[in-house]
Amino acid sequence: MSAKINIQTLKALFTNVDLPGWNAQHLFSPTFRNEQLQKNTQHQYEAAVGIILFIKNNELSVLFIKRTPDPGPHSGQIAFPGGAKEINETHLDAAYREIEEEIGVKKQDLTFIASLSSLYIPVSKFLVYPFVFFCEHLPVLNINKAEVEKILIFSVKDFLNSDVLSTSTIYYNQKEYHVPCFLLNDNIIWGATSMIWNECLSILKQIFNEQNQITRTTI
């Protein structure tokens, strides 16, 4: 199915669509987000993350990382490669730099597709700017173990199955919360990552919907 998906189709898709923004993001908003927003009303830092799309086994696929456990608020979570923006660099440059630092994929290996809606993360006071990239084939990775425990790769169409929509129990400030998430092979994708990814996914769905229509027409 994904053999027809390339740089041109992705750029056309993201160029000709209005970003759904909060309409897509809020579907995976943690139940304690409002509590966090009351405490941390304004961002203090800025960051960028990269959604890397590529073809694997003839399927459009996406790369996530699982963060190495540390004392921070996002310790051990599944995320997109990315991190804090440095002074005198653009958000896009920050995404390129962080991707190379964390997983060893260089700027020249990636084609920029689009920017997504920014998202404020009150627990860490970061305003995050997501970017979508594409590479035909994922290059050899060089994982920075200080920041990345492992790489997770999924077919995009796996997320179109309603069976992956779930809830997970999270403990925050000594309270128990049930938060929406994607659940794939015991991997829980929740919080800001799921919110950002759901916006991207809501756009990518159009490709699969169109291909399904073509398939039904030709049968």
Image: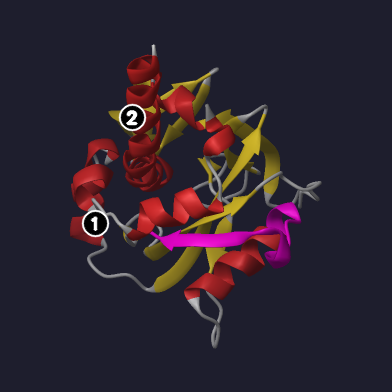
Q: Nearer the viewer, residue 133 or 48?
A: 133
| Marks 1 and 2 close (CB-CB < 8 Å) | no
Return the residue at label 1: 18
Residue 7: percent from the left, percent from the top?
Answer: 55, 53
Return the residue at label 2: 209
What residue is rendered at 76% in x and 56% in y? 104
Amino acid carrying label 1: it is Asp
Q: Is residue 38 visible?
A: yes
Amino acid carrying label 2: it is Asn
Q: Is residue 109 magenta?
A: yes
Tell me the crowding category of disc 1: few under 14, some 14 to 19, or many 20 or more residues within 10 angstroms, Cα based.
few
Q: Is residue 73 visible?
A: no
Name of the residue lying farthest toward the top = 219
Q: Vertically, is 40 above or below 193? A: below
Q: Nearer the viewer, residue 65 or 13?
A: 13
Name of the residue lying farthest toward the bottom = 88
What residue is rendered at 68% in x and 52% in y? 147
Measured in 3D between alpha carbons, the distance from the residue under mark 1 to the one under mark 2, in whole angstroms, is: 17 Å
Residue 65: percent from the left, percent from the top?
Answer: 61, 42
Q: Vertically, is 18 above or below 179? A: below
Name of the residue lying farthest toward the front = 218
Q: Which residues are magenta?
A: 101-116
What residue is rendered at 54% in x and 88% in y? 88
Colour scheme employed for the rendering of this structure: secondary structure
Q: Vertically, is 204 above or below 85? A: above
